[in-house]
Amino acid sequence: MPTYPDRYQIIEEMKDRYPITWLTEMAKVERSGYYKWIKNGKTSSRKQADIVLKEHILSIHQKYKMYGYPRMKIALREKGFHVNHKKVYRLMCELGIHSIIRKKRRVWKNQMSRVFDNVLKRQFNERTENEVFVTDITYLPTKSGFLYLSAVQDLYNNEIVAWKISERNDLELVMDTLQELTAKRNVYRSIIHSDQGFQYTSIKYHQTVEQLGMIGSHSRKGNCHDNACIESFFSHFKSECLYLLHDHSADEVRQAVEEYIYFYNYQRFQKRLNHLAPIEYRHQMAA
């Protein structure tokens, strides 16, 4: 015989299809008991489940930015998550993500958002210092939600030159990261490459890139391999650091980012750099 919590869980899963009164009668439980179960623990469990679902949604979105909520629902189902389209739509809205296919560009003062040509064209190797910068944003799951890491990488030595963390995945995060880059490096006539996220196709970003004398470059739609280098850095960070944390509090995640980027720049040797760390390689080549 199923326990009372098991029966309540079954009722919760079927309540969108059948009346609560009928379900509680069939399960031989009181409605008051079911509602008390919801009040005492179901809400917290649902929030935790939503965090897990959001992490998978963001992971899928990083790879398939063309997915709207109908295809996202199918992708989640293939991962073993059976959720209805309304919930997928709600979670995607909370995350601020959407499909980039057949999406009308927003207009500011009769000007459409801008897309740069793909100047980089996957020519990642044999670049000089400050010649090409690549940038992107990744999500960082915490116990209380998500943080967002924006980073800029110099393809000359794979060094992470600038980075910022925010609780919001917005244009301000990108602009703050770009400002940090310009404070550290001479970016005149440098290529700055990114995907076609809404921040990077905004009028303000486009104007700033041109005012700085930089050359803007965008990946093709839905093609993460066009920005493979920064994606590779994010992957290394998550597998070598983030996923090993015991406590995913926001403060610990922020500290982990700072410590890992220092380790990556100063200590993590790379075969392409003659088995030197990025900054060590830069100093040796300048000597």
Image (cartoon, rainbow, N blue to C red):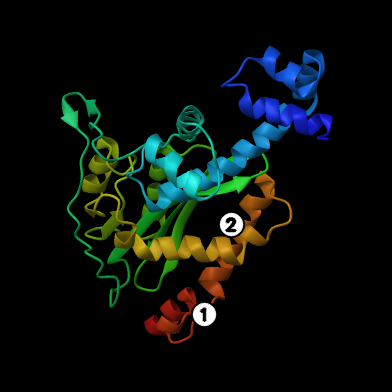
180 and 233: which is toward the camera: 233
179 and 33: which is toward the camera: 33
Rendered position, 283 above or below 221? below
Q: Position of residue 146 (x, y in %)?
A: 57, 42
Q: Position of residue 216 (x, y in %)?
A: 23, 52
Apparent side of residue 114 relative to residue 254 in the rendered image (left or right): left
The quadrant in which the N terminus is found is top right
Name the residue beneath numbered marker 2. Answer: 257
Measure the C-alpha gap from mark 1 to mark 2.
Answer: 18 Å
The answer to whether one can see residue 206 in this image is: yes
Structural crowding at the residue carrying mark 2, measured as other residues with C-alpha within 10 Å and reported as few (<14), some (14–19) or many (≥20): many
Q: Amino acid at mark 2?
A: Val
* Numbered disc 2: secondary structure: helix
Q: Position of residue 147 (x, y in %)?
A: 56, 43
265 and 9: which is toward the camera: 9
Residue at 19% over, 60% down: 119
Structural crowding at the residue carrying mark 1, measured as other residues with C-alpha within 10 Å and reported as few (<14), some (14–19) or many (≥20): some
Residue at 52% over, 66% down: 236
Rendered position, 170 above or below 212? above
Q: Amino acid at mark 1?
A: Phe
251 and 188: which is toward the camera: 251
Residue at 50% over, 37% down: 168
Residue at 68% over, 43% down: 143
Name the residue beneath numbered marker 1. Answer: 269
Apparent side of residue 187 relative to residue 6 in the rendered image (left or right): left
Q: Quadrant of residue 81?
A: top right
The answer to whether one can see residue 186 in this image is: no
* Numbered disc 1: secondary structure: loop
